[in-house]
Image (tube, rainbow, N blue to C red):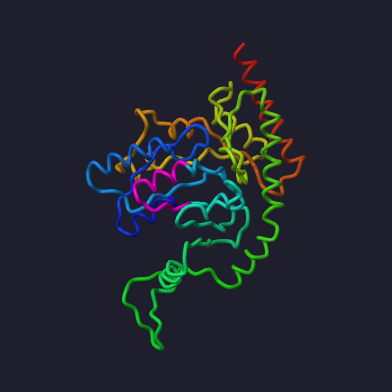
Amino acid sequence: MASVNPIRYVGAIPVLIDSETATWNMSPDALRKAFVQAATKGKLPKAVIVVHLYGVVAKIGEIRHICREFGVPLIEDAAESLGSTWHGQMTGTIGDIGFYSFNGNKIITTSGGGMLMMPNEETKQLALKLATQAREDAPHYEHDQVGYNYRLSNVSAGIGRGQLEVIEQRVQARRRVFARYERMFRQLGTTYQREVPYSRANRWLTAMQLDQTELHRDTLMQRLATAGIESRPVWKPMHLQPVYRDAEYVTVDGEDVSRRLFKNGICLPSGSDLTLVEQQQVIQTVLDTRSIVAEQSV
């Protein structure tokens, strides 16, 4: 929701773009289709917001090319992908503007807030102004536009800067967690978000698809919960959220990929401090659930 709600905050109308099956992120084909439709109406969007879901880099090269072709700025929602790279460049710095989240569940945290990545000093100064109630440079309080109180405190910023020193260790820890899951569940037929060429995902969360397995997501989640293990469905698509049910939604040939990903997708414990014993408990519970399901189907 945090990727879409700001569009409404400023009185704009969101156009939602379907996912693609490799990275589960924005489909470049659906994006191009949306641009063509918008150009036909003579009303191109003000910007495109692409999300690097669960820390896996979107097809950012194709998406950036399309945005440049139509002359529309590209904003990167890198809230979940701090530490992920494409051609060695950090996500959040590839588009025109990027942002990160330091919420409590992110790879580093300041308990809340985030960080903006700006292309130039002029844009930076405008953001700083808007984040401080749009106060003018005057000895008294002078305001010529509406602003916000969106600043990160100095204390929180200091906490975040300290954790940036260990970001690489945390990325490597989460990538090892993902690699174990992928290796141990290979026999089940699970599938995962794929990394685009020349990219590295931080694997903030390990999410897997169960549509090619004998497992049902809700059944597996119940078994994990019984074992004291928290799991979640993958994010529910915005076009299925009641508040955005009337928003325009663009797919390729009518195939609703994001709906299918949501129906069959599950997120597993993936923290940087997840121990081998804890992860093995998760793995064993999944394997045991599969064995029970297999026996019941005989």
> Quick one: which residue is furthest to the front in this view?
69
Q: Horizontal placement of 45 versus 25: left or right?
A: left
- In terms of secondary structure, what is the magenta stretch mainly? helix
Residue 154: give x, y in percent of width and height.
58, 73
Residue 122: give x, y in percent of width and height.
43, 69
Q: Is residue 202 above or below residue 136?
A: above
Q: Is residue 291 above or below residue 93?
A: above
Residue 140 sits in quarter: bottom left
Rendered residue at 36%/34% (across/down)? 251
Residue nearer the viewer, 27 or 14:
27
Rendered residue at 26%/44% (across/down)? 39
Q: Horizontal placement of 43 versus 228: left or right?
A: left
Q: Horizontal placement of 30 versus 200: left or right?
A: left
Residue 163 sits in quarter: bottom right
> Quick one: which residue is furthest to the right in this view?
277
Asked whether 65 falls inside the magenta stretch, the response is yes
Asked whether 288 falls inside the magenta stretch, the response is no
Rendered residue at 40%/37% (across/down)? 18
Q: Which residues are magenta?
A: 62-76
